Amino acid sequence: MIQNNPNALAQARERMIEKLGAKMDKVVGHRGDLYLADFQRIDSDAGHLLLGYERSIGPVGSNDVIACVSRMFDGTLQPVMETAKQYKTEGAVALVVQRTVPTRKYEDRNQMLAVSNIHFLDQQLGDTWEVKAQPDGTRYLARVSRDDIGSIVQERRRRMSVKASVVTFGNTLSAGVPNMNRGDEVRFYDSGQLMTGKVTRVGEADVTIAGPTGNLTVAHEAVVEILQASPQTKQNVRSYLSDYFADAYGFEEYADQLTDRLA
């Protein structure tokens, strides 16, 4: 009988979870347990999104994340999947999302009214287009939107029943993480592009990074991850780990030994 067979119980539970996942995918279009847990604005066009999920159902796949973001924001935001990080213990996925911005060929400006050197008005449609450039220098036109990404997310939160979440950017996922320092090699997001550079200055609210196109100043939230830590950051990590282990085990000498193995 199932109640006397632990293996049978586990197998039955797995089958129930699989059926639930398949049903949610069929009805919702993605895993229905995904919810908006938190958001941090990078600039008017991009931000960090935190999606929570039910851990008992298992890790979330990339297709679920893409479908969830598209459906949740009616196609107005799109995920930058190269930045996605899954936190299985907490039941969360963090990633950068950006506004879906219509683009046109740079040559189309010739049929528009020049408002400035970089802004052009399409008199037929009544919208304004701005000159942008890809990393290789190729220019194109991007439609200027009055909607800030923060407003888009806030409106979505207002319209939906938000599930209370203990997973946020400010606690579980970033507690105790050392701050950036000069010399750190980082991946960061700016003007719709994911780039790599070296931190040259750390301010209270922003950082300056020597990137592929020169020095760029971006918000702390624009930094996706530290690829190579500077000596100062490594020392901060060691200090944090040493304090953590000393508090956990009560022996500073043992904490130092553990820190030497990990840092």
Image (spheres, helix red, strand yellow):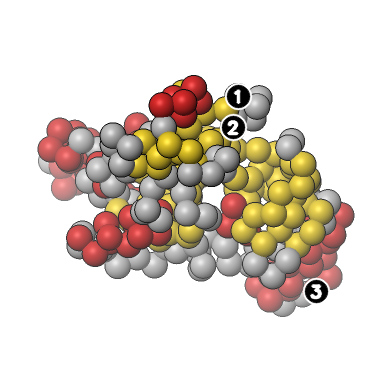
Against 150, residue 247 (above or below) is: below
Disc 1: CA contacts within 10 A as few (<14), some (14-19) or many (>=20): few
Residue at 46 percent across and 26 percent down: it is 110
Q: Pick whichever, 60 or 40, lies toward us.
A: 40
- Mark 1 residue element: loop
Left or right? Give the position of 194 relative to 52: right
* Cα distance between the residues tagged 1 and 2: 5 Å
- Mark 3 residue element: helix
The amino acid type of the residue labelled 1 equals Thr
Q: Pick whichever, 123 or 148, lies toward us.
A: 123
Disc 2: CA contacts within 10 A as few (<14), some (14-19) or many (>=20): few
**Residue on which disc 2 sits:** 133
**Residue on which disc 3 sits:** 252
Disc 3: CA contacts within 10 A as few (<14), some (14-19) or many (>=20): some
- Mark 2 residue element: strand
Which of marks 2 and 1 precedes in the sequence? Answer: 2
Where does residue 18 sit, x and y in percent of width and height?
22, 35
- Image quadrant containing the N terminus: top left
Determine the residue located farthest toward the right in the rendered image: 231
Q: Are marks 1 and 3 in contact (CB under 8 Å)?
A: no
Residue at 38 percent across and 48 percent down: it is 145
Left or right? Give the position of 257 relative to 69: right
* Cα distance between the residues tagged 3 and 2: 54 Å
Q: Pick whichever, 60 or 184, lies toward us.
A: 184
Residue at 20 percent across and 35 percent down: it is 29
**Residue on which disc 1 sits:** 138
Can residue 148 be seen by looking at this rendering? yes
Which of marks 3 and 1 precedes in the sequence? Answer: 1
Residue at 26 percent across and 47 percent down: it is 72
